Amino acid sequence: MSQKFEHIFKEALQNQEVPYDPAAWSALSSKLDKAMPVSGKKPFNPWAGVIIAVAMVGGASLWYFASNNTPTDNKRARVNQTETKNENKAIPAQTADAKNVNTNKVAANENIVADPTNKTIAKGDIHKISSIPAKSLKSDNLFKEGEYIKDQSSLVTPPNIAYDKADLIPAPSKMNTELTKIENTCQYMDKKVTNSSDIRMTIEFPNGRQVVIYPKESKTVDFEEFGTYKVFNSKGKENKFVVYENKAVDFTIDEEHLFNNGIPTTEVKVSNVDPNSNIQWTCKQGNMSRSGNKAEFNFFKDGQYTITVSSTNEKGCSTVSAKKINIANDYNLMATTAFKPQDIDPRYNTFMPFALVERNTSFSMIVIDPKDGGTIYETTDETAGWIGIDKRTGKPAQHGSNYIWKVSLSNPLPGEASSYKGIVTVIID
């Protein structure tokens, strides 16, 4: 401004010339002698008038140019220059979804402002502005120096600073740096872990693999490795937790031996478990449950069944395994469908369902002639099978004749029917 004014002043006075008037200077001199008498008159110096005239013209020029060059115009010129420079600077591209800038923080000694119109900002992008000049920001949203803002689009001239998205945080006095506490858990367990702090946290596996969880985010972690895990953040905080070993339970099914003491039996046995584990078995189709490393299931009807086993160790860790088994035929007391009364082998010359001989259970059995519905034989003794004689007539049954048998159990097993029936054919050689 001072250089511009000197230039204008110089141009105004460069060709200025005041004409010399001797009569005017004589009149002025006589008036001065009356106000301040002198002992003797001295010759009048004409250059004194020139100096006075120059001073008057200079003052008038100064007033004129000062009134036309107002501070407002000067300030506007400076602002235009600043905006022109800022427009020539590259602004980095913005990404992701926007967040509004907090407009309630006011600077104590200077206004630092942000642009509310630009909404294309990256989620979680936060810039520290303590080192950003006030002139590099704009709009009416005010912030206190030393605070952090989330709207990076508010920067007219982006600060020349490097930052890591994971560590962009609120003001240091307000940040939450506490680590999320993770309780001891079991191997192969999926667990949802939430990072409630303002900085990222890292979970380090026993083998060195790391899982990073960013601020205010949740992640489901599969703890497939047992051992000691470490949790830490960039502020030097650290804690540990333990993942207990949890052996995956397995079991075998004995499909060769289908009966035990005349009862349909499927035996199962666990493998790959800790010695002190609690073993539980279930079969929903038969509403059956068992316990122990070995168990037996009784399937009285044909069909497909699912056996499930669960193992819980001393640390409370559990694993589950399930397998299917197919039962081909209904259980019918293992009764034969024919016999030979004249055979010398006692296993074939009488009729008695084999299961009744093996089970040692109370029962009653009758044999019925389908021709008239009459009972031709009855017993409650498993050793007294029917030899093919009609008790009504005492005559033997005819060759190829079919008869109906029926057994009623006094104490059937759980899931077992209380009565059985079938057809037996008499064979005479």
Image (spheres, rainbow, N blue to C red):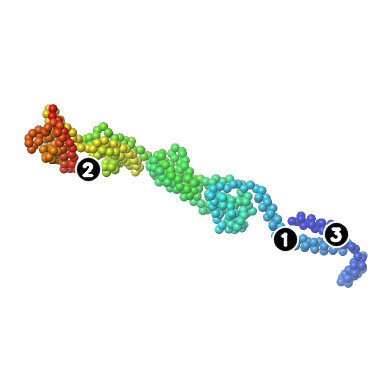
Question: Given this view, does label 1 or label 2 mark the residue nearer the observer?
Answer: 2
Q: Nearer the viewer, mark 2 or mark 3?
A: 2
Residue 209 is situated, as x and y percent measured from the top left of the image, at 46, 39
First in sequence: mark 1 or mark 3? 3
Q: Which residue is mark 2?
A: 414
Give the Cα separation between the discs numbered 1 and 2.
107 Å
Identify which amino acid the numbered label 3 is placed on: Gln
**Counting other residues with Cα less than 10 Å from the Cα at mark 2, is it few (<14), some (14-19), or many (20 or more)?**
few
For residue 337, what is the image quadrant?
Answer: top left
Q: Quadrant of the N terminus?
A: bottom right
Real-space Cα separation, disc 1 to disc 3, in angstroms? 26 Å
- Circles 2 and 3 in contact, beta carbons < 8 Å: no
Q: Amino acid at mark 1?
A: Thr
280 vs 339, nearest the viewer = 339
Q: Is residue 226 visible?
A: yes
Residue 205 numbered mark, or none: none
